[in-house]
Amino acid sequence: MTFNFDTPPDRRGTDSQKWQKYAGRDILPMWVADMDFETAPAIVEAIQRRAAHGIFGYSRPVKSTVDAVLGALASRYRWQVDPSWLVWLPGLVCGLNVAIRAFTEPGDVVLSLSPIYPPFTIAPVGQGRVARNVPLALNTAAGRWEVDWSALEAAVTSRTKVLLLCHPHNPVARVWSREEIAWLANFCARHDLVLCSDEIHCDLLLEPGAVHEPVGVVAPGESARTATFMAPSKTFNVPGLGASFAIIPDAALRAKYVRATAGIVAEVNVFGYVACEAAYRDGEPWRMALVDYLRGNRDFLKDTISREIPGVKIEAPIEATYLAWLNVAALDLANPVKFFEAAGVGLSDGVPFCAAPGTHVRINFGCPRSTLAEALSRMSAAVGAR
Ligand SMILES: Cc1ncc(COP(=O)(O)O)c(C=O)c1O
């Protein structure tokens, strides 16, 4: 079966957060992590069938939904997950906030590796905890972002309680290796930290043959201190349906986590469960085609930037996701986002990701190639006309 990723859907005037931001202005939105693709036909059909039922009461996952999730974890990652380990969540950021409440006290320190997806720092700070970001190191010889192991060790204090890991990493698009994950699990064990691993981008690996190594598979011996977070939302472009889950093998850790959800975490809605089941059970052909398409977009982005947009640099390979972290420091702009908005392209500012002002922006290339080409041509013209 072939799928059409080339035709731009018209999302103007819809409920799309991504497109509403620039309503009435000729600015292509390339910011929030939401793709301009219709989701898999299998998901659309499953939702239509569920809608026809006409009753939308409070829901719980049925066995076939749980089986679809567990089946995907087993076949893709060789991870045998017991159904009791799953905690369903209406969103992954919500799940990270719950983890902070459950596993730390006010004043405790939460570590993450920066630059980093903003909720990793907003969640601890918003709840009276301390966010400590340890900068990743750009290894130019190896051509990749790496953990600065000695800086990470040096950052730990007696108040440090959690490491929030983004795996694969948003925004630098690193796919952490088995060795790196094993080391991080060992680091958490040595310092008695809970390892919370956000693996929302794990099904969007762009290198042929690349393998996602879940923390739960690499370090089963540390399962008493690990919580893994996954969702079909990024991969299948269904973030508006809000279905995510935590995998917490240890009963005591899970009980702590579930207690922290009480009264404040909403149910997953009926369509979220339906989409989740269809995604993991029937969505694989669509996902494979999507990853191929995104790989093409990634290569196009890389070539176009290096050929046509001097002063903008992709510092390391984009191994996963549909998000690229661009170094724009050489352009010497006070506000790169405003500059590119004036040129008709809406990017994410690097500052909330912990980048220094004026140095980085993030571009979302999860869109038809023609949209990406138009955005890059606008950026190139703006840079050329400076
Ligand atoms: C690493 C990461 N975690 C979580 C989310 C958002 O998850 P949700 O929309 O389920 O809160 C994103 C979205 O971009 C993300 O990149």
Image: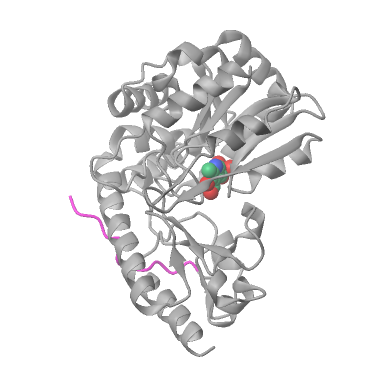
Q: Position of residue 311 (x, y in %)?
A: 48, 75
Q: Is residue 365 above or below residue 57?
A: below
Q: Residue at (62%, 53%) from the top-left corner?
A: 353
Q: Quadrant of residue 314?
A: bottom left
Q: Residue at (49%, 37%) from the top-left corner?
A: 272
Q: Position of residue 4 (x, y in %)?
A: 27, 60
Q: Main secondary structure of the magenta part?
A: loop
Q: From the viewer's perspective, is 201 left or right of 225?
A: left
Q: Residue furthest left?
A: 1
Image quarter where the C terminus lies is: bottom right
Specify the quarter for ligand 1: top right
Q: Position of residue 81 (x, y in %)?
A: 41, 16
Q: Quadrant of residue 339?
A: bottom right
Q: From the viewer's perspective, is 329 left or right of 180?
A: right
Please say which color scheme the image uses: one colour
Residue 91 visible in image: no
46 vs 353, nearest the viewer: 353
Magenta stretch holds residue 260: no
Q: Is residue 333 above or below residue 79?
A: below
> How many labels, in total?
0
355 vs 349, nearest the viewer: 355
Q: Is residue 333 above or below residue 115?
A: below
130 vs 191, nearest the viewer: 191
Residue 298 visible in image: yes
Magenta stretch holds residue 10: yes
Q: Residue at (62%, 57%) from the top-left corner?
A: 355
Q: Residue at (30%, 62%) from the top-left corner?
A: 299
Q: Position of residue 157 (x, y in %)?
A: 73, 26
Q: Residue furthest bottom?
A: 385
Q: Which residues are magenta?
A: 1-11
